[in-house]
């Protein structure tokens, strides 16, 4: 996607990177909070999703056999795996429907997470052949994975029709200072691409292309923050994206369409499984939810859990604090200053909030005695 920036450094926004430095006041009143942080006046607010929060939920079946990773999804292992809903525009259902259909499947076993995707496309083309090139400059398929749903330390993988891969890890979303670790590679990654037609031949019309991806669990363990491989019933945050450029044929080759007035490429289309509500994939709180289903069953819960709803409710504190910082140059000292609406869903409200040595932390007590948290750098989690 064109909104990605790779040259950010950690803590570029002025936030502390050391989460361990926080020492929140249990009262949440803001009185006596340790060394409140003053935010620079130029600190920008975070754009907020313009759709209701209703992530897609998918039940990933346990594979009955090993898929052959050749790009074709016709081998027996895939036949029981349901398709996702067709992809939609990244901004949501109010935008025009994608010109071409995209859908995906997920399987898993004790060694790999498997992703398969099918993309209708009348003209399949690609140019990039070097690993870790900026693959979204071609049409591509993208995978985003946040195992522990804290919106930090997550994975991204992009692949084009030439089976060229860009894999990277994000320590934080770009909005929170990044950085992206571009040199990180998925050891043991297996990929395959199948083209239903002819690649890079504008003289005919193709039907599409498909991809298969097998990601080893031991690599995902690196920043998972939870047991890997997952257990049946575990739920991870995942999203898929397809970048699609408008192209024409010039001198017998495909070329991206440019705007006559500027000579620059027209913006790409971004089609996704679970809509983001804005043109930005790096909002992990908006990604879909994948529940891992145990062997011999297809049963899973399509409902959102109390943990998921609580973390989304606390995300509103994060958004409003960023607005407050942009307008006032400092964090709000109490939730009353933020004028939060009620999240509904039977959650206790308002949350507690206190300033810390690095910013703020807001908490919400859950009915089972556990506590949901969010901090100024956007990280969210549930503690016992």
Image (cartoon, rainbow, N blue to C red):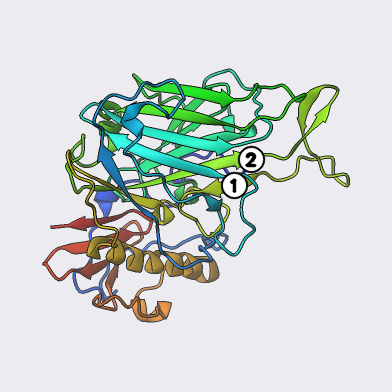
Report how far apart the C-alphas of labels 1 and 2 lie in the structure.
6 Å
The image quadrant of residue 367 is bottom left
- Could you tell me residue 216's position as x and y percent? 30, 26
Is 138 drawn above or below residue 261 in the view shown?
above
Q: Under tag 1, what secondary structure?
A: strand
Query: Which image quadrant for residue 95?
Result: bottom right
Question: Where is mark 1, residue-wise?
Answer: 270
Tag 2 residue: 244
**What residue lies at 40% left-to-right and 68% top-to-bottom?**
316
Q: Going from the N terminus, do you reach mark 1 or mark 2 first? A: 2
Q: Quadrant of the image for the C terminus?
A: bottom left
Towards the viewer: 373 or 305: 305
Q: Is residue 257 left or right of residue 306?
A: right
Depth check: 122 or 355 in front?
122
Q: Position of residue 298 (x, y in %)?
A: 23, 47
Left or right: where does residue 225 sit relative to residue 128?
Answer: left
- Could you say where residue 155 lies in the image, as x and y percent from the top left? 39, 37
Residue at left 67%, top 34%? Answer: 122
Can residue 63 be seen here? The reply is yes
Q: Residues within 10 Å of mark 2 (few under 14, many from 20)?
A: many
Up-down: is 72 above or below 375?
A: above
**Which residue extends farthest right?**
261
């Amino acid at each position: 996607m064109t909104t990605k920036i790779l040259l950010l450094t950690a803590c570029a926004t002025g936030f502390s990177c050391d989460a361990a430095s926080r020492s929140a006041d249990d009262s949440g009143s803001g009185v006596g909070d340790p060394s409140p942080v003053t935010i620079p006046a130029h600190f920008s607010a975070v754009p907020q999703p313009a759709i209701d929060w209703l992530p897609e939920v998918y039940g990933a079946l346990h594979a009955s056999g090993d898929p052959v990773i050749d790009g074709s999804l016709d081998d027996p292992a895939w036949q029981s795996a349901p398709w996702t809903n067709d992809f939609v525009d990244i901004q949501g259902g109010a935008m025009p429907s994608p010109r071409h259909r995209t859908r995906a499947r997920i399987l898993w076993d004790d060694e790999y997470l498997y992703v398969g995707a099918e993309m209708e496309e009348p003209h399949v083309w690609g140019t990039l052949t070097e690993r870790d090139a900026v693959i979204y400059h071609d049409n591509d398929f993208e995978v985003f994975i946040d195992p522990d749903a804290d919106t930090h330390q997550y994975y991204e993988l992009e692949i084009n029709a030439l089976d060229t891969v860009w894999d990277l890890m994000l320590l934080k979303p770009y909005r929170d200072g990044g950085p992206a670790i571009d040199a990180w590679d998925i050891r043991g990654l297996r990929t395959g691409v199948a083209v239903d037609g002819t690649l890079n031949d504008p003289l005919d019309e193709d039907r599409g292309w498909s991809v298969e991806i097998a990601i080893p669990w031991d690599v995902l363990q690196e920043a998972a923050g939870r047991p890997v491989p997952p257990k049946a019933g575990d739920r991870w945050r995942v999203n898929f994206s397809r970048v699609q450029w408008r192209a024409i044929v010039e001198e017998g080759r495909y070329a991206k369409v440019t705007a006559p007035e500027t000579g620059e490429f027209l913006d790409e289309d971004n089609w996704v499984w679970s809509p983001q509500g804005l043109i930005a994939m790096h909002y992990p709180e908006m990604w879909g939810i994948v529940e891992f289903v145990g062997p011999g069953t297809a049963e899973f819960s399509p409902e959102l859990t109390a943990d998921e709803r609580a973390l989304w409710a606390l995300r509103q504190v994060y958004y409003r604090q960023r607005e407050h910082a942009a307008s006032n140059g400092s964090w709000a000292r109490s939730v009353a200053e933020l004028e939060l609406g009620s999240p509904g869903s039977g959650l206790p409200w308002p949350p507690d909030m206190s300033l810390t040595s690095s910013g703020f932390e807001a908490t919400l007590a859950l009915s089972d005695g556990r506590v949901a948290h969010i901090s100024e750098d956007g990280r969210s989690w549930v503690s016992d």
